[in-house]
Image (cartoon, rainbow, N blue to C red):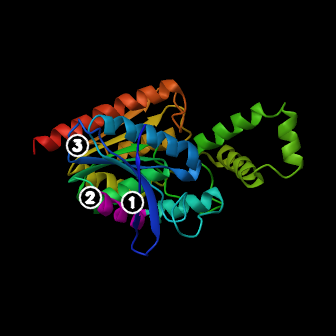
Amino acid sequence: MTWTPCSFRNRNGRELRGLFFDPPPERPPFPLGVVYLPGFVLGYSAVHRLGLHVLDRFSQAGFPGLVFDHAGVGESEGDSLCGAHDELSRHVASGGMLADTIDALGYFGSARPVERMLLIGHCGGALTASYAGAVDTRVVGLALLSPPALEVGEPDAAMPEGAVNQRLRFYRTRLTSGRSWTNLMLGRTDYRTLAKTMLSKVRITVGGAPSLRLNPRLLEAVRTVSRRGRVLIIAGDHDEQIRELNEFMRAVTGQGVTYKILPDTSHGFVTDESMSLLTAELDAFVHAAASLEANR
């Protein structure tokens, strides 16, 4: 795996740092670049690593690639993004990462022989990818990995039913763990999430599953990009929001969007088997997009 460090200034003058993945010298580059947007909200290091493998694979096939840190993230300048998971989720879902992403696409197009772009985003990065694709016409394809389909609510809003059940299964596995009980007593447990899970379960049991509020901005962005190119949405059958994502797909039926559910796969695509399935889907997506562009 090889890459070239790069840096550029965003519209606010902050230095953003990233990595270029260039095709080998013997491989003429396609004028179609791939940008990976990690879902750092759910674990920056792990999902960033997923992106490195994806971009390395496509650069070897001739597609220039870019991954970068938004302001306040990783190696880039800016006040560190911090706070509870819900706060960061609302920041991303409201488009807080969009301006830096548009600036990065402009830099990519000026620094490399790239005329069109494919954006691959995971989780929160999938939201940002869709928002960017909707406003930048150079984007001719989106691959959205486990995108959060629901509109992000207030901090006290009930959790989705699938997320509640998955967390309860996790908590049950810890009932016999002495270390987990010690962490609970010493204040090392995420009490807020624990309490929200229990309260949401009570609400669901008493009043039924909450009505789904799909993210309208994501819906419109997917429809916009699908009218000019290709959109692929991938999720695992073990994803805690699979029910919500299935409902989202019913809302975009007929919009030229492909939906793939990978078996025995969680939100993070963390096993060798799930990575192999994911790679196969992305390979087909990128090469089909390249063929379409070549025939324009």
Q: Locate the N terminus by quadrant.
A: top left
Residue 153 appears in the picture as rendered: no
Q: Measured along the vertical axis of the image, is residue 223 above or below residue 287?
A: below
Kindly identify which residue carries mark 1. 217
**Magenta: predominant secondary structure element?**
helix
Q: Position of residue 243 (x, y in %)?
A: 50, 39
Residue receiving disc 2: 109
Q: Which is in the foreground here, disc 1 or disc 2?
A: 2
Farthest residue, direction left: 296
- Residue 240: give x, y in percent of width and height: 56, 39
The answer to whether any part of residue 11 appears in the image is yes
In the image, residue 102 lies in the stretch drawn in magenta: yes
Q: Report which residue position mark 3 lands on.
A: 29
Apparent side of residue 204 relative to residue 24 in the rendered image (left or right): right
On screen, residue 78 above or below 52: below
Residue 133 x %, y %: 31, 56
